[in-house]
Image (spheres, rainbow, N blue to C red):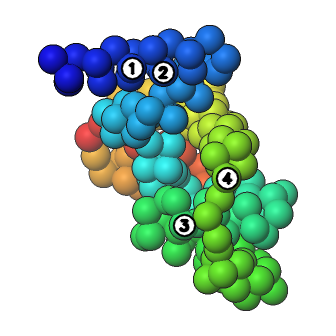
Amino acid sequence: TEGAGLMDNAKAIESILEEGLTPDEVDGLLGRRATFQALETSIWDQLENADPAFVAKYLLNEHPQTIAYILTMIPPSAGAKVLMQMPESRRPDILNRTVNLKEVSPKAAQVIENRVLDIIRDLEKERNAVGTVKVADLMNQLDKTEVESLLDSLEAISRDAATRVRPKIFL
């Protein structure tokens, strides 16, 4: 019978929290946010397969402290590639900030996550650009040797363009 009182108290506390906070804030306080995030692909994992040059170009507009935080959140293999795409003159500061990174407040983390979502949206737009889709559709009508030849010649003039087209080709 004592346990029932504790459950009632927990429900009462949850009810009070829900009156004054947003659902996301309540979930964060009660630890539910972590459960839901584990079920989804995290935004950080979504950057793992992104073009490091694209991500680096986007991050160059951010404060070095923000870049340091993002690099600690994405998978290390992706973070290393992004870091190497940064100008050499900026890398030491970013690394130093990463080494000295402290706990980030939930509000700051949310602002940064929203910024990363912008990167992901722009990345998706670029991946699904009309020209990219049309070129992939054309190449999907060809045989493997013709496609490889065209991709090699495209890569010779624009590695970025070839990188955007390649995932859409089904050989």
Q: Real-space Cα distance between discs 3 and 1?
A: 38 Å
Q: Amino acid at mark 4?
A: Ser
CB atoms at circles 2 and 1 under 8 Å apart? yes
Residue drawn where x is 26% and y is 40% of the image: 171
- How far apart are the two marked residues, 2 and 4, measured between alpha carbons? 23 Å
CA distance for labels 4 and 3 = 15 Å
Residue found at x 51% / y 35%: 29
Quadrant of the rendered image containing residue 154:
bottom right
Q: Which mark is residue 105?
A: 4
Q: Disc 4 to disc 1, how far (Cα)?
A: 28 Å
Q: Which mark is residue 72?
A: 3
Q: Which residue occupies the foreground of this view, 48 or 101?
A: 101
Q: Residues within 10 Å of mark 4 (few under 14, many from 20)?
A: few
**Which comes before the other along the chain, label 2 or label 4?**
2
Report, in whole angstroms, how far the alpha carbon at label 3 lies from the one at label 2. Answer: 34 Å
Q: Nearer the viewer, residue 68 or 7?
A: 7
| Whether residue 77 is situated above or below residue 125 in the rendered picture | below
Where residue 103 appears, as percent x and y from the top left, is: 61, 64
Q: State the SS at label 3.
A: helix
> In front of the other: label 4 or label 3?
4
Give percent across and percent down for residue 45.
43, 50
Asked if residue 76 lies left or right of residue 23, the reply is left
Name the residue furthest left: 1
Q: Does label 3 or label 2 sit earlier along the sequence?
A: 2
Q: With respect to residue 15, does 103 lie above or below?
A: below
Q: Position of residue 135 (x, y in %)?
A: 53, 34
Which amino acid type is shown beneath numbered disc 3? Thr
